[in-house]
Amino acid sequence: MIGVGSISGIYLKNISEVFRDIELVGVCDLIRSRAEKAREEYKVGKIYDRMEEAFADPDVDIILNLTRPYEHYAVTKGALLAGKHVYSEKPLGADWAEGRELFELAVERGLRLGGAPDTFLGAGVQTCRKLIDDGWIGKPIGAAAFMICRGHETWHPDPEFYYKRGGGPMMDMGPYYVTALVNLLGEVSGVTGVTRSAFSRRTITSSEHFGETVEVEVPTYVTGTLQFSSGAVGTIFTTFDVYYPTQARLEIYGERGTIIAPDPNTFGGPIQLYRPEEGVAKEIPLLFDYSQNSRALGLADMASALTDGRDARADAQQILHVLEILTAFERSSEAQGYLPISSRYERRAPMQSGRPRGVLEAGGK
């Protein structure tokens, strides 16, 4: 594990207590006390003073990259060059060029590259996928996704990176929505976008950096339209500029009904299905496991895929496709026009139900 910041806690917990296909060999962080705390609390075997020590460790198969978004590229590239498979937090890179280079490097070296988000593997989105694939709403014709909030500076202990390169609402929260959308509706062939930043500066009011000012370097109000290869059309809106009583909305529209999907930043429900013959939206029970916070599920699936010789579900083609879409909205806005998506995408197999908890496939321990 490279990077033992705020997101690492749930990874440490789930790797230690839930997923039996993976073992945490060691941790590395620029702030050594974070690594020492992880070792003490979760009985981690090794602390690496430098990430290159982890890259060179023969006991390590996969590097888990939990660094800040603008650091993802350098860490992932270093690990791939050292011959390690990599699973990275989102996004794959801070821009499209970084992501494409990492993808090509992994292919060239014959290495696995995967990454977050893995929330789409949870019970919520997997149940929605089954409803769609089984025809409950007929042929999908559209989708709408909204993530509306006023930013992270009031609560996050270190919010500055959200407003720097690789940050912003689309790069930070958009991966959950776009990953869910492509898993439900398939490949995106093109997008249009309009972006802006409503505020040039942010004042931090969380306790650790109270009163400090952050210069905003990325769009914080992003609207877009997605053209899916299937013919469906989606809309997406993400912002850090707006006061709003709720945060998430994800809906899939079909010829015969509508699915009101759960927050794609979570693993569970609720899910509502509306069909005209019913006249009301009805809650649908979850049909798969992993409804609680199961971060590291994608990492465990990747490790299992290495053993089984199959495609990992949160694999390189998915995270590259999602990154191209995320970054295309700003590029489309700058060009003031429609932007084709060049990367190809094919949905991987749905999750299996009825498996022992913490074991992903037949090859698991």
Image: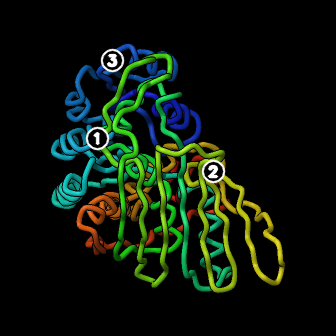
Horizontal side, residue 211 vs residue 282: left or right: left
Q: Where does label 2 land, which residue? A: 290
Q: Which mark is residue 217?
A: 1
Q: How far across and down, in percent of the image, does residue 158 sit?
A: 41, 26
Task: Count residues near mark 2 (Cα–Cα under 10 Å), then give few for <14, some for 14-19, many for 20+.
Answer: some
Q: Amino acid at mark 1?
A: Glu
Task: Count residues near mark 3 (Cα–Cα under 10 Å), then give few for <14, some for 14-19, many for 20+.
Answer: few
Q: Amino acid at mark 2?
A: Tyr
Q: How far across and down, in percent of the image, does residue 357 sit?
A: 63, 48
Q: Secondary structure at mark 1?
A: loop
The CA span between labels 1 and 2 is 36 Å
Horizontal side, residue 34 vs residue 282: left or right: left
| Residue closest to the eye, 141 or 79 | 141
Q: Where does label 3 land, which residue? A: 31
Comes first in the chain, label 2 or label 3: 3
Question: Which residue is rendered at x = 49% and y = 52% of the image?
Answer: 118
Q: Secondary structure at mark 2?
A: loop
Question: Which residue is rendered at x = 64% and y = 86% of the image?
Answer: 255
Q: Amino acid at mark 3?
A: Ile
Q: Secondary structure at mark 3?
A: loop
Comes first in the chain, label 3 or label 1: 3
